[in-house]
Image (tube, rainbow, N blue to C red):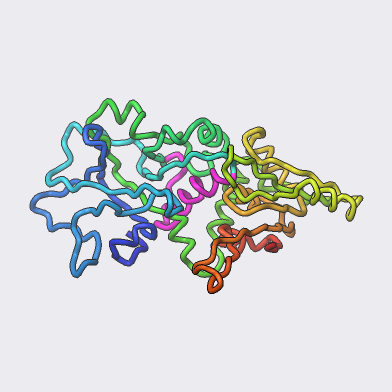
Amino acid sequence: CLGGEGYIDNFMARACEAEHVCWSSEWKEWHFFRSPDETPTPLLYDDGGVITDFPAEFAGTTPFTHYTIPWTSTVVHGAVPPEAVYLESPLVVFHQLNHVHNFGHYLLDNMLPIYLLVSLFNVTVDSNDIQIISELADTYAKMGQKFDRELLPGVSRHLPRFTWSDPLFNQHSLVCARRMLLGTGWYSYSRRSGPLLEINMFRDSVLRNLGLLCTALPQRHLVLIHEKVKLGTQEIRGISNIPELAECLRLTFPSVEVKVVRLDNSTTISEQVQLLRRATVFITPPGGGSFIGMFLPPSATAVVLDHWLPPLAPPPVGASRRHSGDSKMWTSLRHLNVVHF
């Protein structure tokens, strides 16, 4: 494992490589097989000694602490049973694919963490050899499947498989991976100081997959204002005065095209990226939806509207704090001019 420094509570910072781990359809859990004669594998170094059994929270499986479902396993003493079936792909990546409402969250929650997890272990296998495994099929929904068909080949050539619904996992008592990566690649990288070259590599991989890597630079100004779609009554930190903002910009810069855009599932990923590649200014609220800003052309300006978090202490001692949840990405995109409002 990388990250976490061996502490039992640092599961969100831990990314691991495992061999011959199997999903048990009977027990609905992962099994790690160990020979009875084998010296127990040290997993963690905490609580005053060596931990050789998996705790309930061994490794995070999403980029965010507040809704991650930690990966764990049961140690089984003995060899892998002969009836076990192995996945064909030489490399399996386990990641809890989250329900997503827009392309930006699909990038932030799913594809970028997987790409970074593979990069952490310097894996050089072809995307044809990577199989993504998840457990949360019911929450993934049609939106994620739509994005898979358009974007996934940039990471894996195979559609994800879900342990709770895939026929392969339901027809066999044990389905095993010869080599599996798990953990939170994004969280591990976000704890580093300085920009991340890997985010730029990921962006280029997506552009190459869409055939848009070598697009021409914009010849005239285009200002895009990103309107986040409200989910029922849920507040999503959107811009509250978009009509006034757009009108002000049009009056101030009459020769500049100003467009208000909803980057949701009403258009394809390719159409959204092509639009971003034409923009010279992108005004966006924070959050996963803003991640599509990574596809802006060189020298474009991203105006990121941060939001305020409640004070750490009650007033008058405490004060609200400015928060930019996407700062790691923006500081890594050196080809852009990024300003925060």
Q: Where is residue 52 in the image (x, y as percent from the top left)?
A: 18, 58
User: Magenta region: which residues?
Assistant: 104-129
In the rendered structure, the answer to whether residue 126 lies left or right of residue 296 reads: left
Q: Position of residue 252 (x, y in %)?
A: 89, 55
- Depth check, front residue: 290 or 200: 290
| Residue 51 forms part of the magenta stretch | no
- Depth check, front residue: 232 or 338: 232
Q: In this view, does 227 lie above or below 198?
A: above
In the rendered structure, the answer to whether residue 279 lies left or right of residue 169 reads: right
- Depth check, front residue: 58 or 1: 58
- Specify whether residue 56 is in view: yes
In the rendered structure, the answer to whether residue 268 lies left or right of residue 143 reads: right
Characterize the magenta stretch by its predominant secondary structure: helix
Quadrant where the C terminus is found in the figure: bottom right
Question: Which residue is at 53% across, 40% downward?
Answer: 100
Quadrant where the N terminus is found in the figure: bottom left
Question: Which residue is at 33% across, 55% downward?
Answer: 16
| Residue 117 forms part of the magenta stretch | yes
